[in-house]
Amino acid sequence: MTTDDPCPTPQDLPPDSLAALDARLLAFARERDWEQFHSPKNLSMALAGECGELLEHFQWLTEAQSTALAPDKRQAVAHEVADILIYLIRLCQRLGIDPIAAAYDKIAINETRYPAHRVRGDARRADEYLDLAP
């Protein structure tokens, strides 16, 4: 979706769909005349900042502590996740990227790069598998 596209009505879409969230975010930005600030550069920088804020919640926690968050900490993490999702969706809107299609494309690439029968239980990067042949 680009700046010139008409704004779909969120009420006409399933409430729990990505399309409804996408429409609501676009309407939110347009109602505030914020699209002028939402360049891909600015959105990607905001996205990186929010990822940093998410990381702060887990810094210094043990693995066990990171999976057993107190309710207030879990809510704070949920808000950071929401901020990340919001900026990611806005970035996709501005660049005309379908995030679902992009994710499926990337999964297909990773299925080739990391064949399950060869990498099961091993979390190295693809270029660290010297013994992998296509």
Image (cartoon, grey):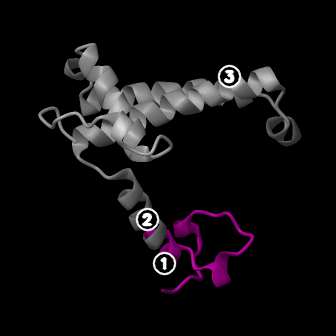
* Residue 35 to residue 110: above or below: above
Q: Which mark is residue 104?
A: 2
Q: What is the C-alpha distance between the residues marked 1 and 2?
A: 13 Å
- 90 on left or right of 78: left
Q: CA distance from mark 2 to mark 3?
A: 29 Å
| Residue at the spot of label 1 | 112
Q: Residues within 10 Å of mark 2 (few under 14, many from 20)?
A: few
Query: In the current view of this chain or complex, which residue is farthest to the left?
Result: 4
Q: What number of labels is visible?
A: 3
Q: Which residues are magenta?
A: 109-134
Q: Is residue 46 visible?
A: yes
SS for dot 1 = helix
Image depth: mark 3 or mark 1 in front: 3
Picture disc at residue 76: 3
Kind of element beneath mark 3 = helix
* Residue type, label 3: Ala
Sequence-earlier tag: 1 or 2: 2
Magenta segment: does it hold 116?
yes
Q: Are marks 2 and 3 in contact (CB under 8 Å)?
A: no
Q: Position of residue 119 (x, y in %)?
A: 66, 75
Q: Is 54 placed above or below 124 here?
A: above
Question: Residue at the spot x=52%, y=68% of the render?
Answer: 127
Mark 1 is surrounded, within 10 Å at the Cα level, by few (under 14), some (14 to 19) or many (20 or more) other residues, namely few
92 shown above or below 52:
below
